[in-house]
Image (cartoon, helix red, strand yellow):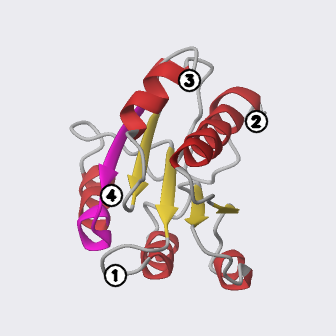
Amino acid sequence: MGAQITPTADTANSHVLFVGTPKVDLATICAESTPDAVSVDVVTDGQAALKQLIAASETPDELQLPDLVLLQLDFTLPDGQTVLQAIRASPRLEQLPVVVLDPDDSDNTQIYQAEGNAYVQLPQTPAAYTERIDSILRFWFEWAQYPATCLYPDG
């Protein structure tokens, strides 16, 4: 199967891995805010997230790779940049789209140099946080347009 990610028009089959400590109940946000529910797994530990991703890449028939990784910078070691670098270093995971979420106003240069797909500063209030996550999910699963043919060499 390789690391090919093929977003579908049917967002009910879309899967998000949130790595970090969200300020809100992401499962509820996804269920209520998108026309078709997007499933979300929250993993608060970077090392556990990497183990989950590697397991999914090695057994694609048993475990589902996410369609999108939301990676928060402020969580238990390894930090978000280390997780992003590990994803990009893995031939099976390198094509996973990763949106880096930063609750502080950090320098995003390192994120893009590490090949993060996007950098988003998260607001501080739960309501604004909910709105930002909803916007990211709507963009990724409803508004973004993908090529008609696979661009990945193993797809």
Q: Are marks 1 and 4 in contact (CB under 8 Å)?
A: no
Q: CA distance from mark 2 to mark 3?
A: 17 Å
Does label 2 or label 4 sit earlier along the sequence?
Answer: 4
Comparing labels 1 and 4, the label whose residue is closer to the camera: 1
Q: CA distance from mark 1 to mark 4?
A: 14 Å
Residue for point 52% across, 15% down: 36
The image shows residue 3 at horizontal and vertical percentages of 48, 53
Q: Kindly state the secondary structure of the residue where label 3 is placed.
A: helix
Residue for point 26% across, 73% down: 47
Amino acid bearing label 4: Leu
Magenta-highlighted residues = 39-49
Comparing labels 1 and 2, the label whose residue is closer to the camera: 1
Q: Residue 146's quadrant in the figure?
A: top right
Numbered circles on residues, count: 4
- Which residue is more in the foreground, 134 or 5? 134
Q: Are marks 1 and 3 in contact (CB under 8 Å)?
A: no
- Which residue is more in the foreground, 36 or 146? 36
Mark 3 sits on what residue?
A: 33
Q: Is residue 113 above or below residue 13?
A: below
Q: Kindly state the secondary structure of the residue where label 2 is placed.
A: loop
Please say whether residue 1 is visible from this viewpoint. Answer: no
Mark 4 sits on what residue?
A: 53
Does label 3 or label 4 sit earlier along the sequence?
Answer: 3
Q: CA distance from mark 3 to mark 4?
A: 26 Å
- Numbered tag placed on residue 78 in the rendering: 1
Q: Residue 57's quadrant in the figure?
A: bottom left
Comparing labels 1 and 3, the label whose residue is closer to the camera: 3
Mark 2 sits on what residue?
A: 144
Q: CA distance from mark 2 to mark 4?
A: 24 Å
Alpha-carbon neighbours of circle 1 within 10 Å: few (<14), some, or many (≥20)?
some
Determine whether, in the image, residue 62 is placed left or right of residue 36.
Answer: left
Amino acid bearing label 3: Ser
